[in-house]
Amino acid sequence: MDTKEAQKNHFSSILTRFHAGYFRISLSLCSQALLWKTLSEPSDDIHKIRNIFRMLPSTAFILLWSLALFALISLSLLYFLRFLFHFDMVKREFLHHVGVNYLYAPWISWLMLLQATPFFKHEGVCFLILWWIFIVPILALDIKIYGQWITKGKRFLSGVANPTSQLSVIGNLVGARAAAEMGWNESALLLFAIGMSHYLVLFVTLYQRLPGSSSIPAMLRPVFFLFLAAPSMASLAWDSIYGKFDSSSKMLFFLSIFLFLSLVSRPALFKRSMRKFNVSWWAYSFPLTIMAMASTKYAQEMKNTASHILMLFLSALSVIVSLVLMIFTALNSNSLLPCDADDSMHCNSKNQRSSIV
């Protein structure tokens, strides 16, 4: 009886410490699956560097897709159990200006995994039904978050805006790309317009309110890499809507490259966050992978050696970062759910401060 009670308490402890921020893992794995599919797709690009990726065995892609599916189902089940047994904590997360942004993450992950699926066509009924299932929660969160921005004004937005707010934009853009692949261009344009209009407001707000690294807790500074993901995803979404990686897509891709160089040129900003493993490290992988996907479309459009070298570099970097993170996660699995100060928003201790991002 004591053993059962101890196991019950341990499981309950896991649920209380688990939070939507752990969906960073599924974001990374699902985006990797989509990247591999993009690289292996047939195209009119016959450059020899591109042919390297077409040699990848299909079995490897299916295994990666299955791993991403397993991780996403596991995380979704854990969060569903948290919803059932600790609804008050989920409600508190929903009302938190950072926690609510991570509620986009599972739906973004499902949409990317749906686009990467090797089992049915994007024009099929199954794809359409699943798209609606995954896009409705995103639209509901849009109404909640963007409605607050509109009704409460600039002062409210300046107080709550943070790098994780870009997940709300990314959710709309991923949904737009999926709709465009079904041929639903009007729906895709709707989601793209919602996402980009708020991205412009958010981008300016973040530039104005971030005076330096002191505004972000040291452990959570990898979240700055989300600055790369939004313009990269926008370039991919517009490519799917317009049917070509045109000047608009290129400008958005170049913006993500500039932001990437701006971040990597300041390694001291991330030094303290790398001293001890934390799930926030997974914030590096997803933006790099989305940027690598955009680079594949850019290389396909340009068809020159320089663009293909850039594609090869970014794709290899995203794969290496994801592999390293998987290894670190496996090695630190016992301490993956700590109740530390930086994640205190999701813990019960009254003495711990709330995290900023």
Image (spheres, helix red, strand yellow):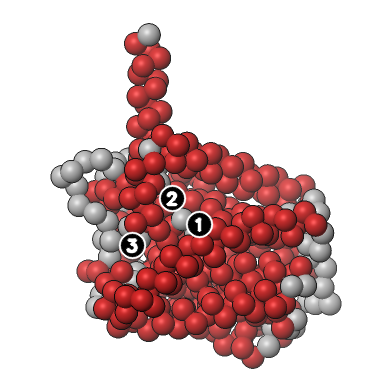
Of residues 189 and 119, the one nearer the viewer is: 189
Label of residue 20 in the image:
2
Q: Could you tell me the amino acid type at mark 1? A: Ala
Residue 227 in which image quadrant: bottom left
Quarter of the image with the N terminus in it? top left
Q: Which of pointers 3 and 2 lies earlier in the amino acid sequence?
A: 2
- Between the C-alphas of marks 3 and 2, the distance is 13 Å
Q: Which of pointers 1 and 2 lies earlier in the amino acid sequence?
A: 2
Q: Nearer the viewer, mark 3 or mark 1?
A: 3
Q: Which residue is mark 3?
A: 97
The reply to whether discs 1 and 2 touch (Cβ–Cβ < 8 Å) is yes
The secondary structure type at the circle numbered 2 is helix
Of residues 171 and 312, the one nearer the viewer is: 171
Q: Could you tell me the amino acid type at mark 3? A: His
The reply to whether discs 3 and 2 touch (Cβ–Cβ < 8 Å) is no
Q: Could you tell me the amino acid type at mark 2? A: Ala
Q: Which of pointers 3 and 1 lies earlier in the amino acid sequence?
A: 3
Residue 225: % across, % down: 43, 68
User: Does residue 307 appear left or right of residue 79 in this picture?
Assistant: right
Instruction: Residue 277: tell me if it is visible.
Output: no
- Between the C-alphas of marks 3 and 1, the distance is 15 Å
Residue 69: % across, % down: 64, 46
Name the residue at 31% across, 81% down: 154
Q: Nearer the viewer, mark 3 or mark 2?
A: 3
